[in-house]
Image: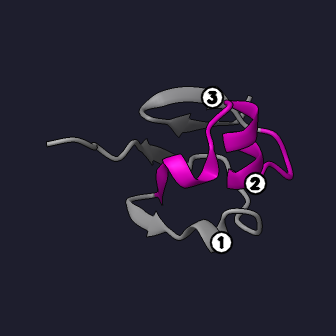
Amino acid sequence: MSEFTLNQQPQPWREGLSVAALLAEHGRAPAAVATALNGAFLPRSCREATLIRPGDELTLIQPITGG
């Protein structure tokens, strides 16, 4: 079985899964999280077209607010 990692946790990979679709499946609001794919920042505008591949490392970063 092919996998990728999401925040260092193995996840089953499936063909055609975009970063945007994964965020929606996990109930994450697109504006509320930053994304990095394989260590590189992934702009919000690229998430729909960016497909996750086996072996990819996706990191979701929740911005810290407050003072």
Q: Earlier in the sequence, mark 3 or mark 1?
A: 3
Q: Earlier in the sequence, mark 1 or mark 2?
A: 2
Name the disc covering residue 33, or none: none
Q: Which residue is denoted by mark 1 in the rendering? A: 46
Amino acid type of the residue that numbered disc 1 sits on in the rendered structure: Cys
Look at mark 2 in the image and give the residue it sits on. 18
> Residue placed at 51% from the left, 47% from the top?
32
Which element carries disc 1, helix, strand or loop? helix
Colour basis: one colour
Q: Tell me the quadrant of the picture where the C terminus can be found.
A: top left
- Could you say where residue 25 lies in the image, as x and y percent from the top left? 75, 33
Check contact, mark 3 vs mark 1: CB within 8 A. no
Q: Nearer the viewer, mark 3 or mark 2?
A: 2
Q: Nearer the viewer, mark 1 or mark 2?
A: 1
Q: Which mark is residue 11?
A: 3
Instruction: Please tell me in which quadrant of the rendered image residue 1 appears.
Output: top right
